[in-house]
Image (cartoon, helix red, strand yellow):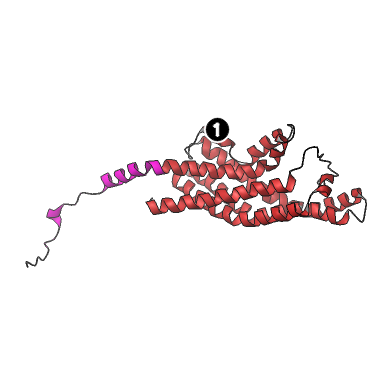
Amino acid sequence: MTAEMLKKRKRNLLLGLIGAVLMVVGDMLWQVRGAGAVTTTLGAFADKAWLDMGVWRFVTSNILFAAAVPLYYIGFTEMYHMIREHGRDKTDRVLIRLFRIGMLAGTMAFIFIHTLCLNMPLIMQGIAPHVTVEKAAEITNHVMMLNIVPMVLYFLAADGLLTVAMIALVWRKTLPVNKFAWLCNPICTAVIGNVLGMLPWPMNQLGYAGEAFGHLMIMVVALIVLKKDEKLMPKRRKKQDDDRPILNLDDEPDADVTVI
């Protein structure tokens, strides 16, 4: 890898990191509540607390995700190419394919999933003044259920496959990072987020960013691996130089020499 290629890879991974940060902020805008706010779920999805939230939060959150997804694609595509360079056997090739499928599923679905989730509070706010809160929650839950199949399937692909691939790649040392990096994936951070959700305010608010934070940590792992690759570059260059055949001038054809 040349210095120019290394610079390009670092830039792309940083763009992916920025995209993941925007996703974290978007999730926080969507769900964070103030001190004393009570989450009152009505049915499968609808939350009475949505009625007290500003519309600007949902609109801004959606814009952030729209900006994040292209950056996410750039960063995770670059990481996919980096993992391919570290792959060693057939098992790694399978894991790399899983990583790519999960990354592509996230690229295609995150705007859809996030917009759908944000439309739920907007629908509930729009109809609540005209019907009872319970009826507004019933309609909101019904709309969500009509979209639940593609949302769940894409979510499982985008988060589930990435999680399986990341855990296996770390444990197999395909990605040369600390073994605790197996926690750097969306499902593990979502579980940690649920644990944080049981803490007092404001610590419990961090749990809302758990799943998105996992994608951010994947980009952190990629940058750590890149840093290690960068340190190995001089050794790799030396090895390549040592492997080059020695040019024997005696074997070269005579050249026409013009004496001036």
Name the amino acid type tagged 1. Answer: Phe
Q: Is residue 231 magenta?
A: yes
> Where residue 166 appears, x then y in whole percent?
56, 41
| In the rendered image, the vertical position of residue 240 relative to residue 112, given as above or below | above
Q: Does the magenta stretch include residue 81?
A: no
Q: Give the residue number, with chain letter if any, for mark 1.
A: 180
* 150 sits to left or right of 84: right
Decide which of 204, 146 is in the foreground and name it: 204
The residue furthest front is 35
* 219 sits to left or right of 234: right
Q: Can residue 88 be seen in this view?
A: no
> Where residue 242 appears, x then y in whole percent?
26, 44
Tag 1's secondary structure? helix
Decide which of 10, 73 is in the foreground and name it: 10
Disc 1 residue crowd, few under 14, some 14–19, many 20+, Cα 10 Å: few
Q: Residue at x 58, y 39 (%)?
A: 184
Decide which of 130, 189 is in the foreground and name it: 130
> Where residue 73 appears, x then y in whole percent?
57, 54
Q: Residue at x 12, y 63 (%)?
A: 255
What span is colored magenta in the figure? 230-254
Decide which of 37, 190 is in the foreground and name it: 37
> Main SS of the magenta segment?
helix
The residue furthest left is 259
> Where residue 251 appears, x then y in whole percent?
14, 55
Q: Is residue 54 visible?
A: yes
